[in-house]
Image (tube, helix red, strand yellow):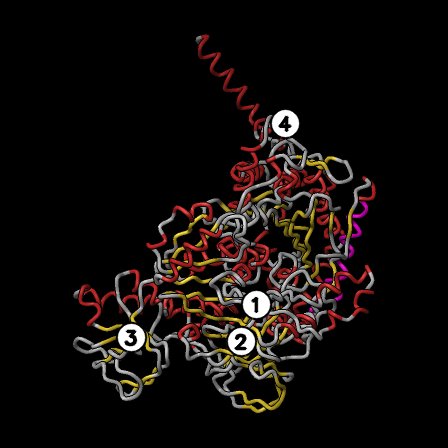
Amino acid sequence: MSLTRIKFFAVFALLLFATPLYAQIQSPSEFLGYEPGERFTPHHRVIGYFKHVADQSEWVSFDKYGWTNERRELVYVIVTTPENHENIEEIRTNNLKLTGLTEGEPTDNRKAIVWLSYNIHGNEASSSEAAIKTLYELVRAENEEARGWLGNTVVIMDPMINPDGRDRYVNWYNQMVGEDFNARFDAREHHEPWPGGRPNHYYFDLNRDWAWQTQAESKQRAEIYKKWMPHVHVDYHEQGYNSPYYFAPAAEPFHESITDWQRQFQTEIGKNHTKYFDREGWLYFTRERFDLFYPSYGDTWPTFNGAIGMTYEQAGHSLAGLAIETQEGDTLTLHDRLTHHYITGISTIEVTSQNADRVISEFENHFDRGRNNPDGRYKTYVVKGDNNPDKIHSLLTFLDDQQIRYGRSGTIKNTDGFDYMTQETGRVSVSENDILISAYQPQSQLVRVLFEPDPVLSDSLSYDITAWETHYRYGLKGYALTSRIEPSETASPGDFITSGITGFRGNPYAFISKWDDMKDARFLAEITQKGVKSRFSEVPFQVEGRNYEAGSLIITRANNGHLGSSFHEIVTSAAENHARSLYAAQTGFVTQGSDFGSGNVKYIDKPEVAMLSGEGTSSLNVGEIWHFLDKQLDYPVTMIHTEHLSRADLSAFNVLILPSGSYSDVLDDSMWSEIKEWIRDGGRLIAVGGANRVLAGKDGFRLSVKSPDDDTIENDPEEKLRTWSEREREAIQSRTAGAVYEITLDNTHPLAFGYGETYHSLKLNASAFSYLDTGWNIGAARPGAHVSGFVGHKAKQNLEHTLAIGIQDMGSGSVVYMIENPLFRGFWENGKLLFVNALFLR
């Protein structure tokens, strides 16, 4: 054998025997090239490390569950013993059988399931670093204690819920920091620019979206969550950099539906954390600030799905960077922050494993009680079958997403119930076609949370909005019944879709479409972008024996000759895309109302929409409007940065949206003069939410803030003797954290077309504006308008006789005042058509 061949086989043998060494799991520092905490790790490297560990370890499996808007991967890993991995599908389906959401009897192979969710707020960036360390320590061969926990426990880890927001922050920070960090607060690396890394691509706060699932990340994550239904869920966060660490138990108010066990075990988990924190002398607090009431958080939505849901809050946030000097003179480092999160994660797994049998049995009991003995006053929730079928379709689609069961009544029954529309309790009638949602079902707790008319607040100091009931959210009539009535017939969202062209023959004079739902709006948005010219009737009318309400769309052949033969195809194709029913009228002569050539049938100018964004605006509100136009209405908007507005050609637009913001530092008097001149030339300015405070009292704008009456308690000298300990409760007397109000509408005005005489709105703050003395008061909060949710007694008094929606003419243009944000968090379905009206029906 030649020397060359001998050398070849020697090298081959060396590589062969050395392979196990190269297959070892690398530590985070070996893989990344730096110790965790020395710098921020971008998304692709975090995912790379999780993939590396899964490739090298029988204890970890790696799965992709979706993509963000910016095409970053969403992934999770399952961490448990190799034996459990071999039977992981049995373990998963057994757990679903315990809930009753999947049929069948479970085997004895039952494991506790812990889900750890990291970095839902992108600039609360320490938790993804902690996830790296946690994963390594769980599977490191030398860590026998951690491996022991995994014998009876399955750990699911989502290392980065919000990759787009995190990379926005991390990439910015890495550009700002020098060779060494600067811990001084004033250093530029501690002050990220607008919009910040907290929200996702569309500037949504994903931690308010767990239940509503308006965002791509939330929708895709929820599908995986429902396949597992974990017993314990942790959502990792950061708070102000001077704060101690926060962990469970949570603060009051707890929603009344939360069970004794759910309260008890989160306390047990918290006590286990104190063992480690006390040993190290780390400061922490519990039972303050972070409550369990609003249902769309990363702790509450899992709780209402049967888990022990918890938020963990580490000091830091975007201001902390790699290190920052605290008010106590210490230096808080990224390493400190990730270490604290690592400890609570390990502690959560430990105490769950130690109590695995109890955790599993109580989880099963939770769903069993829901099926057989549900809590709460109301046992059946009714959605009237004569509601707008489009709205019923949207509701049922949401219920399917939440795994909530429903069906048709199938019978006629008179009983006692609470009427959501009248706010009264008395005799009500259930009809055959009504939709029934029984409390006797696996998701009973979630049903109660979403449908209870006015949930009880054990403490008015809540962290978020306090009302969200589903009938009000969708604008649906219905009842809450104290008696149990089970549906006798099945139903599905598809039952409420009707589409097609009626009366189509020859060359129709006009196509007619109703106008009372977002599906109608999407239809109009599509045909408008494709060049179709449309009209809407300002009055109700009857044509060829068919009745139509004011606001109905009239799409005449005469206006669309420029489209030739494609006109019919564009309109009918769009109707099919959005499941719209059109009537092909053969004449423009009506038997009641106004003929199609009347001045009461208005031409719809194509909206050319611009919106201010950037410094001075609320990124959350900008995101709500941007997402609505871009993803829900599918209509183009030009986003103009406030600092560029003075150089923008406003004449190219006929609609300008002013989102919530301050604007004082970004728009000077000359710019406001230019905006007013643009309005006078025919533009429409739409002020949303907090933007109205900017316009109130400004020259040329007729909006004014309403002051409390002189005889209110605010002028009582004794009020000045309040105690310091009551300062927060004193303050909330003049606030509302988010409540439902019944707004009286002038539905003869185009801004309110598609609505009845009232509209249920979310009142998001206590800002009160007087009725317009010049213009039209389209929506008003009258005495007794408060429906549900917390409102301080001073705020409630001041909000009587106040403007909710108004319009002021200014030259050839107009200003629309939307005092409340109808697009709040993308979930208040009942308000969206109001915004479309402001865009199109001018």
Residue matched to label 4: 180
Question: Whole-percent x and y of residue 733?
Answer: 71, 68
Residue type, mark 3 in image: Ile
* Front position in the image: 837 or 372: 837
The magenta stretch is 257-275
Residue labelled with disc 1: 103
Would residue 541 be found to the left or right of residue 149 on screen? left
- Judged from the image, the secondary structure of the residue bearing numbered disc 1 is loop
* Distance of label 3 from label 4 (alpha carbons): 66 Å
Residue 245 in the image: above or below residue 307: above
Please report whichever mark, 4 or 2, sits nearer to the chain's N-terminal start. Answer: 4
In the rendered structure, which amino acid carries the disc numbered 2? Ala
Q: Residue at x 17, y 65 (%)?
A: 564
Image depth: mark 1 or mark 3 in front: 3
Residues under numbered marks 1 and 3 in contact, where contact means CB atoms less than 8 Å apart: no
Residue at image point 65% right, 31% down: 182
Q: Residues within 10 Å of mark 2 (few under 14, many from 20)?
A: many
Q: Is residue 440 visible?
A: no
Q: At numbered mark 2, what does the secondary structure look like: helix, strand or loop?
A: strand
| Amino acid type shown at disc 4 | Asp
For the N terminus, the quadrant is top left
Mark 3 neighbour class, 10 Å CA radius: few under 14, some 14 to 19, many 20 or more? many
Q: In this rendering, which labeled residue sits more in front, label 4 or label 1?
A: 4
| Marked residue nearer the N-terminal end (3 or 4) | 4
What is the CA distance from the residue labelled 2 to the residue labelled 1? Answer: 50 Å
Which residue is under mark 2? 780
CB-based contact (under 8 Å), mark 2 and mark 3: no
